[in-house]
Amino acid sequence: MRKSLMNKYKILIVDDDTDLSMLIMDMLEDNGYIATNVTSLDAAYEVLEKEQFHLILLDINLPDGTGFELCQELRRVSNVPVIFASARTSEDDKITGLDMGGDDYIPKPYSIKELMSRINALLRRTYGSKEQGEKYSLKAGKDNEIVIDTASKSVTRNNIPIKLSLREYDLLLYMAERKGQALHKDMLISEVWSAFSIVEPSTLTVHIRWLREKLENNPSEPVFLKTVRKVGYMLEESNE
């Protein structure tokens, strides 16, 4: 029997053990979660560019690298919770996983019930209850509205879900929290990509363009994501 839909969190499993991953996916879906499985680093990077997840279950030994690498890269752009699940059980591996930004480490083989308990606990610590999330609404005229729901990490445009990458979501949320403020390009890069990342201004420009393509009726004449000359960008709403 499925639990309440309040648990509709999206979880990414990065593990090349497909049999185990299918078992975990069944467990997660039975408990009301949405689960996705990939079996390599390249596949993980690809799906993370397209979708947001609330938690990542990450193996260490992967065909094209290690989970440590992925976690380290993730921490440059996101605070999504990560649980390492690995047959590598040495103290050094556990310390490395946590030092790389992991939130928990569970050695294989593990109890499915224990894994579920750890996932639930980490989601509660990270997000609290769904009711604790905030919603940001932006309107332009009567029939053009964007809603950002931080509890579910989802974005809708006129009640239609919009798929954003992690960086697109973080950029949009950062600007929504400062609605009506002109934000300098350097500040956006530093805050959204972190001060420790080397990001060219053109990267920000491209992400703004992608957001406009997804959120604006006419991306060449934006009503939400405005360019502020000699400064950067501003997210605002309009009564027009």
Image (spheres, rainbow, N blue to C red):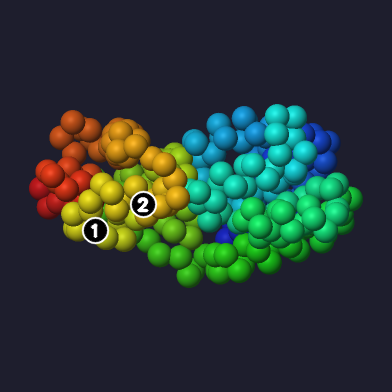
Which quadrant would residue 126 be assigned to in this image?
A: bottom right
Residue 172, percent from left and from top? 34, 49
Quick one: SS at disc 1? loop
Q: Residue at x 50, y 36 (%)?
A: 49
Q: Is residue 2 visible?
A: no
Within 10 Å of disc 1 (Cα), the crowding (few <14, some 14-19, many 20+) is: some
Residue 113, percent from left and from top? 82, 59
Q: Is residue 12 left or right of residue 158?
A: right
2 vs 1, front mark: 2
Q: Nearer the viewer, residue 13 or 228?
A: 228
Q: Residue at x 18, y 39 (%)?
A: 222
Which quadrant would residue 65 be assigned to in this image?
A: top right
Residue 185, percent from left and from top? 26, 47
Residue for badge 2:
190
Q: Is residue 120 left or right of residue 196?
A: right
Q: Is residue 48 left or right of residue 26?
A: left
Residue 62, percent from left and from top? 74, 35
Q: Is residue 52 visible?
A: yes
Question: Mark 2 is on which residue type?
Answer: Ser
Residue for badge 1:
179
Q: Residue at x 45, y 50 (%)?
A: 196
Q: Between marks 2 and 1, how big is the CA–CA gap?
A: 18 Å
Farthest residue in the right direction? Answer: 109
Within 10 Å of disc 2 (Cα), the crowding (few <14, some 14-19, many 20+) is: some
Disc marking residue 66: none
Quick one: SS at disc 2? helix
Question: Mark 1 is on which residue type?
Answer: Lys
